[in-house]
Amino acid sequence: MVALRDTEAAIRALREAFDTAERAGAPGVASVALAYEGVHHGLAGRLDGVHDCLGRLDARLADSRVDHAAWHLGLVLRLAVATVSDPETGFRAGKLWEETYIDSPVSFGVLNTAAAACVGDVEGTQWRLREAIRQSQERSADDGFPDWLIPLAVLAHAVGNVVLCRKLVTAIRRSPVPTHNFLHTIIYRQLRDRVGLAEQNSLDEQTIEEVFDEAMSWMDSLATTENSGPQQPIS
């Protein structure tokens, strides 16, 4: 996939798509191309490039959700990038996601769960993650790994448990299955850049499900000993 092998080639192709759409009088398509350019900057860890694309996208959309595809992509890109680099912004983006998609059968997932986790909201992460897994199991036979480790790694990072965060990030990296989409990959790569990889690959001694269960038990233990952040479902 060229997007992962050659960031510059992917960005050039998207800028060409943007220009072509603009000339063809298809501003909605151009906005989507611009948002995807931001995604590829995010994959490469270029936060300045991401914020430039988001600023231009915001100006094009002028707070309108009529161009829903571009608006949605801009929202989830902002959420993914901010989860590690700017947690308060990530949390607000996650809240907006839930307000927008509250009646959707896919209203919960890795992204909005990570948005709760990034501000250290233990109980909010608990119920969001379990609901996300329930919704996923209802519509897919995919077990969701390694992506379900991402919100747990974000929570570990937020509360200062670097050892656990590094273990989870390493399990994601060593998983035989890659992360499921670019936005999840952006969060994983930011965490990896912050905490690094462990010398010991936990998947040499545990299955990824066992790593997940261990991290879930850790999170549940936090909820019984801490008065965490925002805890109520958004209604």
Image: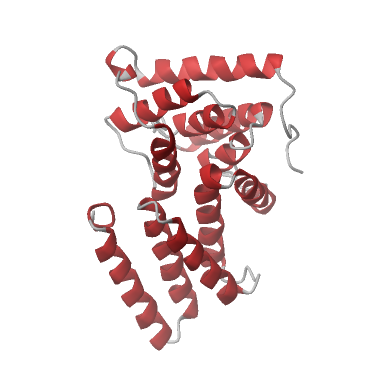
Task: Give the quadrant of the C terminus.
Answer: top right
In this rendering, the answer to whether 204 lies above or below 76 is above
- Looking at the picture, the colour scheme in use is secondary structure
* Percent position of residue 169, x then y: 39, 30
Q: Quadrant of residue 222?
A: top right
* Percent position of residue 49, x then y: 43, 63
Residue drawn where x is 39% and y is 36% of the image: 192
In this rendering, the answer to whether 234 lies above or below 67 is above
Relative to 16, 70 lies left or right: right
Q: Quadrant of residue 10?
A: bottom left
Residue drawn where x is 74% and y is 42% of the image: 234
Relative to 168, 63 lies left or right: right
* Percent position of residue 19, x then y: 37, 81
Viewer-side residue, 20 vs 154: 154
In this rendering, the answer to whether 18 lies above or below 5 is below
Viewer-side residue, 215 vs 27: 215
* Percent position of residue 231, x then y: 73, 31
Residue drawn where x is 42% and y is 83% of the image: 22
User: Taking the image as drawn, is residue 103 in sight?
Assistant: no
Relative to 109, 45 lies left or right: left
Residue drawn where x is 69% and y is 50% of the image: 99
Q: Quadrant of residue 187?
A: top left
User: Taking the image as drawn, is residue 198 in sight?
Assistant: yes
Viewer-side residue, 8 vs 1: 8
In this rendering, the answer to whether 50 lies above or below 174 is below
